[in-house]
Amino acid sequence: MLKYDPPMDERRVAEDALGVMGEPTEYARIDILRARNTPLIIEVELIEPMLFFDFFPETVEVFADHIEKALRK
């Protein structure tokens, strides 16, 4: 699996989708396709059992630190 650095218009669409939730989330994955050069959301996942740690092992500690900080609030 390759890391993907989305262009600004895709980031904006994803951030807008998360903004609708009203509450911060600890995890989210937003799947986007481009149609006629426009980013379109095809799926929003707020629960992910896999979390892709096998592909990006460095994210295990980042995610654990985030959960720890959230619990201390």
Image: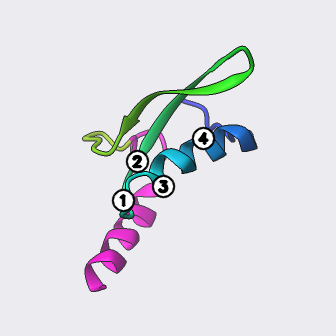
Q: Residue drawn 72% across and 14% down?
A: 36
Instruction: Give the Cα separation between the discs numbered 1 and 4.
Output: 16 Å
Q: Residues within 10 Å of mark 4 (few under 14, many from 20)?
A: some
Task: Work out how far the residue at label 2 is from the one at label 4, CA to CA, in angstroms.
Answer: 13 Å
Expressed as whole percent of the image width and height from the top left, the position of residue 61 reads 41, 65
Disc on the earlier residue, 3 or 1: 3
- Dot 2 or dot 4, earlier in sequence: 4
The secondary structure type at the circle numbered 3 is helix
Residue sitting at x 48%, y 55%: 19
Q: Which residue is mark 2?
A: 28
Q: What amino acid is labelled 3 in the image?
A: Gly
The type of colouring in the image is rainbow
Marks 4/3 in contact by CB < 8 Å: the verdict is no
The picture quadrant where one finds residue 54 is top left
Residue 19 disc label: 3
Whether residue 60 is in magenta: the answer is: yes
The three-letter amino acid code for the residue at tag 2 is: Ala
Give me the C-alpha separation between circle 3 and circle 1: 10 Å
Residue 66 versus residue 7 in the image, above or below: below
Residue at screen point 71% across, 39% down: 9
- The mark found on residue 13 in the picture is 4
Looking at the image, is mark 3 or mark 2 earlier in the sequence? 3
Kind of residue indicated by mark 4:
Val
In front here: 13 or 65?
13
- Looking at marks 1 and 4 on the same chain, the residue that comes earlier in the sequence is marked by 4
Magenta-drawn segment:
52-73
Spot the residue most to the top. Answer: 36
Name the quadrant containing residue 72. bottom left
Q: Which residue is mark 1?
A: 25
